[in-house]
Image (cartoon, helix red, strand yellow):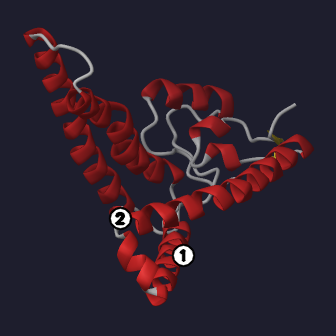
């Protein structure tokens, strides 16, 4: 039982390996469950985003109905551009992790600790917090830069699934592929139908 069936030999060493083979009923049910979850989650995330942006300048947005409408149109256009132009879930996840996970889980807690003055701080803790903050900022800047550069420089249309070899596989993966598929030292570049 699994998400896909009838995978070709050596499928794990090919481009987009999780898309090779044929769909199963379990996979289709799971996919529809995720789609419904995303639709329901959007009903929460989008209004929260709108309210948060409007809270930055509440007097302005309260007095200008046109500004509220433009904000919603810009957010919709931005989400559509991201959804249609970013073909790699990994690159988008990298950007999200670098920007928001690091900010929410590393940088803001350190800043919040000092803003609230919750506990007396010794010199060792200050050094540790400085190191954590600098490291978090480093990951935020360079992780975001790397993710954005990957999104900009990557082809808009990814290669079809099943092409061997996928970029970045190890030598041991290549050897295993050749054991399973055959071909010795020959690298096969045939697309799996």
Vertical position of residue 41 compared to residue 7: above or below: below
Q: Residue at x 63, y 54 (%)?
A: 161
Q: Which mark is residue 37?
A: none
Residue 8, how many percent across, how many down?
A: 74, 41
Residue tagged 2: 56
Q: Quadrant of residue 107?
A: top left
Q: CA distance from mark 1 to mark 2?
A: 19 Å
**From where the camera sits, is residue 177 visible?**
yes
Residue 9, how many percent across, how many down?
A: 72, 36
Residue tagged 1: 76
Q: Quadrant of the N terminus?
A: top right
Contact (Cβ within 8 Å) of mark 1 with mark 2: no
Q: Residues within 10 Å of mark 1 (few under 14, many from 20)?
A: few
Tag 2's secondary structure?
helix
Residue 69, how many percent across, how many down?
A: 51, 84
Q: Earlier in the sequence, mark 1 or mark 2?
A: 2
Task: Decide which of 13, 139 is in the foreground and name it.
Answer: 139
């Amino acid at each position: 039982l699994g998400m896909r069936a009838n995978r070709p030999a050596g499928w794990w060493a090919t481009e987009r390996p999780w898309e090779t083979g044929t769909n199963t009923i379990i996979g289709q049910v799971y996919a529809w469950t995720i789609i419904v979850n995303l639709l329901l989650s959007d009903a929460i995330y989008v209004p929260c985003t709108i309210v948060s942006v409007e809270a930055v300048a509440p007097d302005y947005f309260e007095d200008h109905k046109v500004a509220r409408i433009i904000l919603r149109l810009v957010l919709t256009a931005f989400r559509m551009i991201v959804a249609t132009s970013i073909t790699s879930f990994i690159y988008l996840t990298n950007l999200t992790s670098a920007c928001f996970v690091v900010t929410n889980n590393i940088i803001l807690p350190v800043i919040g600790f000092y803003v609230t003055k919750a506990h007396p701080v010794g010199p060792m803790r200050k050094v540790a917090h400085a190191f954590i903050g600098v490291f978090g900022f480093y990951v935020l800047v360079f992780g975001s830069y790397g993710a954005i550069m990957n999104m900009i420089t990557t082809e808009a249309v990814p290669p079809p699934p099943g092409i061997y070899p996928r970029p970045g596989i190890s030598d041991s993966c290549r050897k295993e592929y050749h054991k399973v598929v055959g071909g010795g030292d020959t690298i096969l570049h045939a697309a799996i139908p």
